[in-house]
Amino acid sequence: MKDEHRRDDEPSDWFTLDNAAKIYPAAHTDSKPQVFRLSVTLTSPIRVARLQDAAERMIVRCPYFRVHLKRGAFWYYLERCDALPLIEPLADEPVSGFAIRRTHDLLFRVLARDATVAIDFSHVLTDGHGAMRFLASIIAEYLRLCGEPIEADPWLLDPDERPAAEESEDAYRRYFRKRLSKPPELGPAYHVPGFPLPGYRVITGRLPVAEALATAKRYGATLTEYLTAAYIESVVERHRHQSESFIRPRKSVIRIEVPVNMRRLFPSRSMRNFSLFVSPEIDLALGEYTFDEIVKIVHHTMNVQLDPRQLLRQLGRNVAGELNPFVRVVPLFLKDVYLSYLHYRLGDRLYSGVISNLGRFSFPASVEKHVRSVGFTLGRNPVRKKDCAVVSHGNELSISIGSMITGRELESRFFRRLVEDGNAVTVSEVGG
């Protein structure tokens, strides 16, 4: 029997994983679930039945998200399924971890409580850009089903519109160029030590965007550069305190992974992953740094690494590895072992933390008036232990630092820097 929720014009019954997604199934564990959360709080309580209808209409519009993960002989792939998202209660847990290999599960969860809608996404499915657009479209459709007049907008996905082929493309393949030199090899970085928490704690600071932008401008930096420098300074302080203890740190490099939305440099309408990274760092073996010096290093490093030619080297290395004839014929059970190791060697091991700044979470005016606030949280990572997620809406900047360890010294120093620079920060905490 034909599923009444399926469209007659939908594409094939399976999708390959995009280049970034290929590593996530192998790296996925219960303690490192490779998920992130986006949330929107409205001005009125959620009507769950209407939200359910909106989510169902939007998942039919986005067949590349209506999939579950399957094992092939050589690679994982995404198989189309008839599952529909079921609205679940939003608990106090900052980000839910879910088993991506369950045969009939979607790779995202929609949750609601009071006036808040949240979606937990597996990174196998999409990145922050695709997640923001999908959630914004669900919110707009929900409001329309509630009787609100919602204007059409290019940012919003129309549930009555056929999906564009480019939405499901692997944009990494599209921009891949052969025979580019590889980016420089990086050495291991310092990781903040600490005693493990039983759960996951998120400390969120909210402050006016205008104040934060003005502060960054005073330092001659962008907002992302300023926040990255503040985070590095906070890690430096933890390194200094540890250096004064009986267990001295073995690593002197503090390096932060800063995701880059590649669509800003290489046009693409892909709703799947299309992000790479820049990696500003300082080496404490060379001496001490003032905050102004850290800002300058971050600013100049990011300017160099954000050059499209530099990013293409990183993209080329990643895609060339996937296309390597030997790699392609290695059985999946062996790839799992290798890719898990690769994720550690080229990922977790190299970074003291992550700062992911999604930028402005925007809505058309007809939706905007119903939105009170937004949130963004990264999932757990037992190697880095702490990561930072940033998003803005209206004149509010939200900065959430997730932690798997008990100590709050890093978060305290980070937000103290913002306050010392004249920002009015309101701090809250969940989980733990």
Image (cartoon, grey):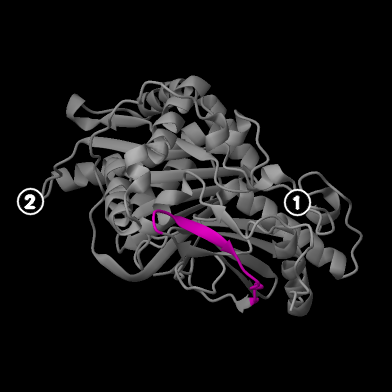
Residue that badge 1 annotates: 163
Q: Which residues are magenta?
A: 73-87
- Determine the residue positioned at 79% across, 62% down: 8
Horizontal and vertical percent position of residue 200: 39, 67
Q: Quadrant of the N terminus?
A: bottom right
**Mark on residue 246?**
2
| Dominant secondary structure of the residues highlighted in magenta in the image | loop
Image quarter for residue 139? bottom right
Numbered disc 2: secondary structure: loop
Please report the residue visible at 53 percent of the width from the left and 47 percent of the height from the top: 390
- Name which of mark 2 and mark 1 comes first in the sequence: 1
Q: Is residue 313 visible?
A: yes
Left/right of residue 169 with respect to residue 142 in the rendered view: left
| C-alpha separation, residue under disc 2 versus residue under disc 1 | 59 Å
Q: Residue 234: which disc? A: none
Decide if residue 45 is in sight here: no
Q: Nearer the viewer, residue 206 or 432?
A: 432
Disc 1, SS? loop
Task: Tell me the crowding category of disc 1: few under 14, some 14 to 19, or many 20 or more residues within 10 angstroms, Cα based.
Answer: some
Give the crowd class for mark 2: few <14, some 14-19, many >=20 residues within 10 Å.
few
Residue 271 in magenta stretch? no
Q: Looking at numbered disc 1 in the image, what kind of residue is underneath it?
A: Pro
Position of residue 47 relative to residue 316, above or below, is below
Give the residue at x 59% y 58%.
14
